[in-house]
Image (cartoon, rainbow, N blue to C red):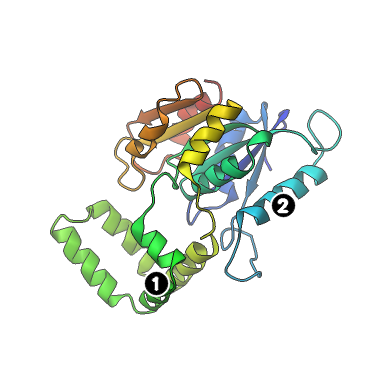
Amino acid sequence: MYGSGEKFLFCFHGYGENAESFSFLETLLGKGYRFISIDLPFHGSTKWEDGLLFTPNDLIDIIQALLLLLPSPTGGEGQGVRFSLLGYSMGGRVALQLLQLFPHEIEQVVLIAPDGLHKNFWYWFSTQTWMGNKLFAFTMKHPGLLFGLMNTAGKLNLLNKSIVKIAHYYLDDANERALLYKRWITMRKFRPHLYSIKSVIKQNKIPVRFLFGKYDQIILSKRSNFLKEDKENIQVQVIEAGHQLLKEKYASEIVNLFYQ
């Protein structure tokens, strides 16, 4: 938890990161918000012992329990208090799912290079199908063929070299590959339905702010284009950066999203 403001802000980090990733924002936002930053399964200090499945309803239960336990900054319990969401990358997909299922309690949403705006075939195949899951598990234990295909695709410019570099960062180590499998499979039920979300935003007049990096090869800003027509509630900002936007040097850009 960070800050002492009068508004609750639930924060969801990116892949391989943790709840501490948002701590640099406390200085600039802590007087207006009470940050509640959660380590997702197989991340940070969370000890996940409930099998390889974490559902949106599980997270909603956790949020509701926390709001009952935490005193509201304005006095009394947090029950019935509206809150905001801040999600980065994988955490953006989490925030989008909550927005879809839980809109009446949500005051504002800030999404930084969010996953979930595009259905990636390989992610879907690996996590949502029996055959894909078996192949995914085998590949994580025996990655030689995958590395060969990636390296060849990179040399032929069929796959962006930065993506190849990131893939090697997470896949060269056997423990990291095992974590990748666990994390992807456990979070497989977070599948936001984008046109439902578009409708929810408009019906409930929820301010949603996006921040993208112009040179991001992982999460492309154009994925948000279908939302841009709702100019009343949705704003999209693209800055001179890559995917790693949750950093102190971009703090001012992130903070500004909360006050637009």
Q: Residue 239 appears in which quarter of the rendering?
A: top left
Secondary structure beneath disc 2? Answer: helix
Q: Which mark is residue 181?
A: none
Secondary structure beneath disc 1? Answer: helix
Residue 154 in view, yes or no: yes
How many angstroms separate mark 1 from mark 2 (CA)?
Answer: 30 Å
* Residue 134 point in image, percent of width and height: 42, 76
Name the residue that disc number 1 marks. Answer: 136
**Type of the residue with mark 1:** Phe
Name the residue that disc number 2 marks. Answer: 61
Q: Residue 168 appears in which quarter of the rendering?
A: bottom left
Q: Is residue 235 left or right of residue 13?
A: left
Q: Say which of 241 and 50 sits in front.
A: 50
Q: How many marks?
A: 2
Question: Where is 53 relative to 68, above or below?
Answer: below
> For the point 50% across and 52% down, which residue is it?
191
* Residue 19 point in image, percent of width and height: 59, 49
* Residue 58 point in image, percent of width and height: 67, 56
> For the point 55% across and 46% down, which residue is it?
97
Residue 28 in view, yes or no: no
* Residue 68 point in image, percent of width and height: 81, 44
Q: Is residue 137 left or right of residue 256?
A: left
Q: Is residue 206 left or right of residue 158?
A: right
